[in-house]
Amino acid sequence: MNFLKKHVAVVQDYSILCGRMLRGLLQRPHCTDEIVFQADAIGVGSVPIVMLTGFFTGAILTLQTSTTLAEFGATTTTGQLVSISMVTQLGPVLSGLMVSGRNSAGIASEIGSMLVTDQIDAMRALGADPVRRLLAPRLLATSIMLIFLTIIADAIGILGGAVIASALLGQNGSKYFHSAYEALHYSDLFEGLVKPFFFGFIISSSGCYYGMATRGGTQGVGRSTTHAVVTASTLIIVTNFLISRLTIGIFGR
């Protein structure tokens, strides 16, 4: 019974904090400078790892599926398979997981360190709201920048598939890109852009929640960092399934 109460309390505290962060985004004056700074740190700083992940995901996807498609004489559909898989599933999920490992941990450790060194209390003493000044900008910056990071991952993933298809498998590059373009529908693009927004919300809110819940000095910071990454990664996978099921129910694919 205590176990259940503990987790219900966690969900309640997390929901309250998310509500406070959303409210902080609407209050004036807006912390524009902090939002831009966080967008640069979170978005631009994550570009290399997202590009690397996207390229090799598209490459291995092409390499693995081409053998099976060749058995049915359907190698011309390689571009379709790679583009749909990258845009709707692999691009958003893998980008979210990469950013989660990098930024959810970073947010939790940064906020947790400020908490245990009494910097958060100092902000409150000076009349500043740490939720509006620190947490809300991270929430908005992560949610927006993950959309652009996912677009980059999708494009690089499709390009990586094209490199393998043309260089190693001898397929026609123009046909690959044409089939990849023709396979995508507006529903696929909608799904591929909605997911990273929610994933960014999960990543930033998890990092902020566990950062603000840090207790026990430097050891507590380490625990908060671990909990933030595990929670964000798990919620990303679960949310991916829920959004996929919803879009299939709405659009039929």
Image: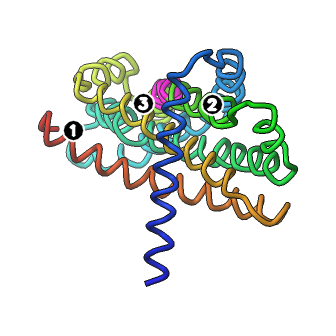
Name the residue located 72 percent from the left edge and 28 percent from the top edge: 41
- Amino acid at the residue labelled 3: Gly
Give SS at disc 3. loop
Along the line of sight, the residue nearer the viewer: 73 or 51: 51
Q: Are marks 3 and 2 in contact (CB under 8 Å)?
A: no
Number of numbered discs on residues? 3
Q: Name the residue under label 1.
A: 247
Q: Is mark 2 on a helix, strand or loop?
A: helix
Residue plotted at (83% across, 54% down): 116
Chain part drawn in magenta: 147-157
Viewer-side label of 1, 2: 2
Residue 148 drawn at (x, y percent): 51, 23
Which of disc 3 and disc 1 is earlier in sequence?
A: 3
Q: Which of marks 3 and 2 is nearer the N terminus?
A: 2
| Residue at image coords 48%, 82% | 2
Q: Which quarter of the figure has residue 84?
A: top left
- The label shown at residue 170 is 3
